[in-house]
Amino acid sequence: MANSKILASVMGKQITEADVDEFIANLGQRGQNYNTPEGRKIVLDELINQKLLLLDAQRNLYEGDPLFQAQLAKMKENLLISFAVEKTVANVRATEADAKAFYDANPEQFAQGETVNASHILVDSEEKANDILAKINAGEITFEDAAQQFSSCPSSAKGGNLGDFGAGQMVPEFDEACFAMEVGEMRGPVKTQFGYHIIKLNAKNPASTIPYEQIKAQLIEHVSQDKQKTAYQSKLNQLKILYQVDRF
């Protein structure tokens, strides 16, 4: 296997491709910066350094140092605590029935308000907006072509289309105009802090509820976490009965 390839050896202690992979993985998102030929060489150098330090620590019998023994004991305690928590919640998982029951009992959490789909053309002056609007109304240019040619918004690349959005997601003047328009209507100029907009309403989507099947996996995970918290607290309650706790 490729990841078992030996990359270096320090007094017989081997460093493999898998060791480099593990080091990078333990860095989390930051590790992606090292997943390059140059980055992996840096990681290998660091692993070699660690082996050298380990050999020196063993040669100097640091393992018997009282300070090290105290640190080791504390680390062991923390590992045991983590392991005990894992054992407590290891088999606690929500079923699909649990997730469906949560979904049915909390309909307000899955309600989606009305949304609209709109396109716009954004320019820096009312005069320019009126001129473009007149050309669109006269059939000299389509709304989409005008957006690509004149709009300063990045949405110009998509003919001005902003996609679907709900109430309150846009600046107030723009938001108010969109939700007052009829499908197919064009309105403008509408002034906002960004400039002057010509708006075209493409669609209105009525309020709806997110279907259960669409979020089933997320719900199972959510309910599982709740059940694990309950199991954890229940375990602590039992332990407080079993073991004496004194507060000072």
Image: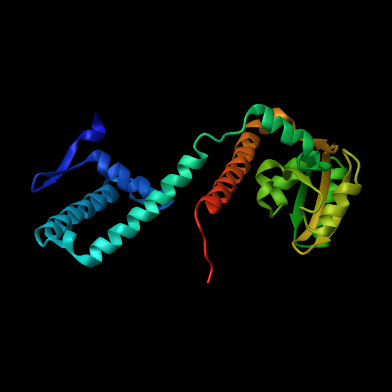
Q: Quarter holding the N terminus?
A: top left
Q: Nearer the viewer, residue 188 or 234?
A: 234
Q: Position of residue 210 (x, y in %)?
A: 75, 35
Question: Looking at the picture, does residue 1 appear above or below residue 164?
Answer: above
State the residue lying farthest toward the bottom.
Answer: 248
Q: Quadrant of residue 6?
A: top left
Whole-percent x and y of residue 28? 41, 49
Given residues 39 and 124, the one toward you in this image is 39
Residue 90, placed above or below residue 72: above
The answer to whether 85 appears left or right of 63 in the picture is: right
Where does the image place residue 223, in percent across and percent down from the top left? Answer: 64, 38
Give the camera-side residue of 99 and 137. 99
Can you see residue 141?
no
Residue at image point 80% right, 42% down: 108
Residue at the spot 87% in from the left edge and 54% down from the top edge: 176
Whether residue 4 is visible to the viewer of this picture, yes or no, is yes
Q: Residue at x 68, y 47 (%)?
A: 155
